[in-house]
Amino acid sequence: EDGSSGWLRYSPSPQANRYYHTLPSQVITLNNTEVSPVYVACLELQKGLQGIFGKRVNVTHENGNASASVIVGTVDKYIKVYGNADEVPKLKEDGFWLSTEHDTVRILGQNERGALYGTFEYLSMLAQGNFSQVTYATNPNAPIRWVNHWDNMDGSIERGYGDRSIFFENGEVVDNPDRASKYARLLASIRINGVIVNNVNANASLLSSRNIEGLGRIADAFRPYGVQLGISLNFASPKLVGGLSTFDPLDASVIAWWTKITDEIYQHIPDMAGYLIKANSEGQPGPLTYNRTLAQGANLFAKALRPHGGIVMFRAFVYNQLNESDWKADRANAAVEFFKDLDGQFDDNVVVQIKYGPIDFQVREPTSPLFGNLYKTSTAIELQVTQEYLGQQCHLVYLPPLWKTVLDFDLRVDNKSSLVSDIISGERFRRPLGGSAAVVNVGTSTTWLGSHLAMSNLYAYGRLAWNPADDPQSMLQDWIRLTFSLDENVINTITKMFMQSWPAYENYSGNLGIQTLTDILYTHFGPNPASQDNNGWGQWTRADHMTIGMDRTVSNGTGFSGQYPPEIAQRYENIDTTPDDLLLWFHHVNYTHRLQSGKTVIQHFYDAHYNGAETAQAFVTMWESLKDKIDSERYNEVLFRQTYQAGHSIVWRDAVSNYYWNLSGIPDEANRVGHHPWRIEAESMTLNGYEAYLVHPFETASNYTAII
Ligand code: BDP
């Protein structure tokens, strides 16, 4: 159990004997092309039934007696063979219909991909010990359900915590696509249909003929699983690798160059999903260099892709709000400032990809107001399975509850229900495209993400991309059953840990909407509250001796709250209607300001940091209680990480509490901050060969002192 099977373990069912005779004894495939999703579905059924029940089943193309069979295929093929499919409602693209009633299991997809999804669904039921008789159809919320890799050509991964890239090494695409194929299988099981394989900070050398050929290999490995490959582009490629003197998106030679490259890519990858573009952001080149708009930049690619059916995902993560001198400059305002006026100017095959919050994957952010400002543009939400600011896979943070705060958020555009999930599906503004993308740092680690527990986030991401109304806890419990065990105690204990994990991390890393108080400039790991203010992009906590928080109101602050539709804008403009968990995001207050909870801001800080760290200690004992119920390999690896988190949460707690105690001079009512009677400081021990020295920033080591 090294984690490589993820949630597709097909481990033996404790109920195998009881249900063996009810299982199908053959698989009837309706679509019989060699390596197609339906072909893969049949292999998967054989593998699953063998693993879970020890039952061998044959695959046949015959269409005679269907009793005691699983029939897999598309609805169209089913009608051809069996005459009609009257029971099956009209399905959307990729949707499927599953019926396990009577003695024939029928798994029918709108397309082959849907049939494969239905197969995984059926096997997931069996693997979870669910033998109920069901008949239902399910359809995706949105057509785009992608993951984004930040893999570099040299094989490293930006913000990667799961070892090396599975796609690239030494500047080239890997020769052996086996791992890519295994990954596609995992993705298909959660209904992900697209992968951008390289970093948004893209290297133009990806476009060499040799690399394009290599991408073809990866796409071939993905294809049987219904997963399409896409790539990130460097906007300056015509100049960097094309020998042109410009990358102006309106220049004829530039247009011709992109058209040619795009055609070449489609020769190797006829079903290429499209391009992802990070332009004029964090040093990346873009159309603004030539005084062209971001929409003109996006449309350049849209036109090259259109004949091939590809789409452009254009990132809204563009900002240049430096605020060293201007206290009103606010990076949170950037996306709306850059994109609002471009609404209506993007081609139909462009999707603007918007991070869930206005800053950058923080532990708590309000919903990005850009979702409520683009009526004539298709949009997608960008989430991050990679726990960049959220403990980098060393802390347990189950993310769906955080993501749901955004997906379920009602922006009240035109005073009408406007859930983010309905906006990105295209439904609210009647857009043709839309969906989700998640940054995923899967690498060569046997655990894929560098941590067994972090896989829950990838699993749930796929589920939410398909159905944003899915419940975080029930998705989690499915994942636990598939990943660990059907044992009630295991399910309950892990559920408890996970459902407490995001609140705990928020408590010790930055609460009341102050953002994750991590080192913001470099590592994005570990506490460094001062760095939030001492940099040109930030000034986010605006903390001084008396006050804290960023005033983002229209009346006195940066005006950010005014970017929301009126009902929401009023809610955040007014301190009394701003929820506590976003108070310091929107308002600048005294440390002694009373929250709706009745506590002062500073006392809430202290209490939250202690509570959060205490919860993280409890994760260790909860996990230890499962010792005999989890295989030793995964038990020990998880225990190691939980022990680390327990310790690091104390570092967080003390660093942040000490920092604000020092700044405000207001003591902790419970007299904990600065007093740790039970703790033995390293520098107080007798240490041969070690020396104590003062650290900077002071709060990152207790007593200002570290040992080297
Ligand atoms: C930030 C990451 C940086 C990414 C950037 C992005 O720190 O590595 O390049 O986002 O999303 O969060 O483009």
Image: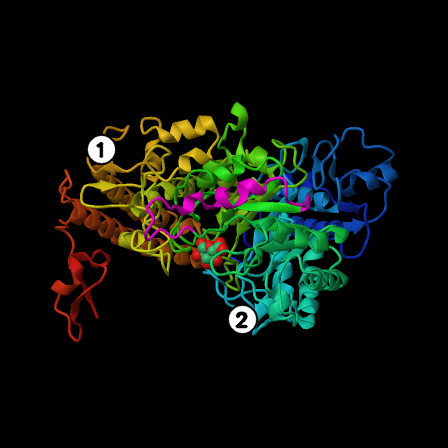
Query: Range of the magenta residues?
Result: 321-349
Is residue 444 highlighted in magenta? no
Which quarter of the rendered picture does the C terminus lie within? bottom left
Q: Residue at x 70, y 71 (%)?
A: 209
Q: Residues within 10 Å of mark 1 (few under 14, many from 20)?
A: some
Disc 1: which residue: 593
Left or right of residue 437, residue 244 in this image? right
Camera-nearest residue between 307 and 556: 556
Q: Position of residue 127 (x, y in %)?
A: 59, 44
Left or right of residue 421, residue 263 in this image? right
Asked whether residue 60 is in view, the answer is yes
| Number of numbered discs on residues | 2
Q: Which labelled disc corresponds to residue 154? A: 2
Q: Position of residue 86 (x, y in %)?
A: 80, 29
Q: Residues within 10 Å of mark 2 (few under 14, many from 20)?
A: some
Q: Position of residue 439 (x, y in %)?
A: 52, 52
For residue 691, above or below residue 445: below
For the residues labelled 2 and 1, the Cα–Cα distance comes to: 51 Å
Camera-nearest residue between 299 and 16: 299
For residue 580, above or below residue 15: above
Q: Are marks 2 and 1 in contact (CB under 8 Å)?
A: no
Query: Which amino acid is tagged 1?
Result: His
The residue lying furthest to the top in this view is: 415
For residue 660, above or below residue 559: below
Is residue 336 highlighted in magenta? yes
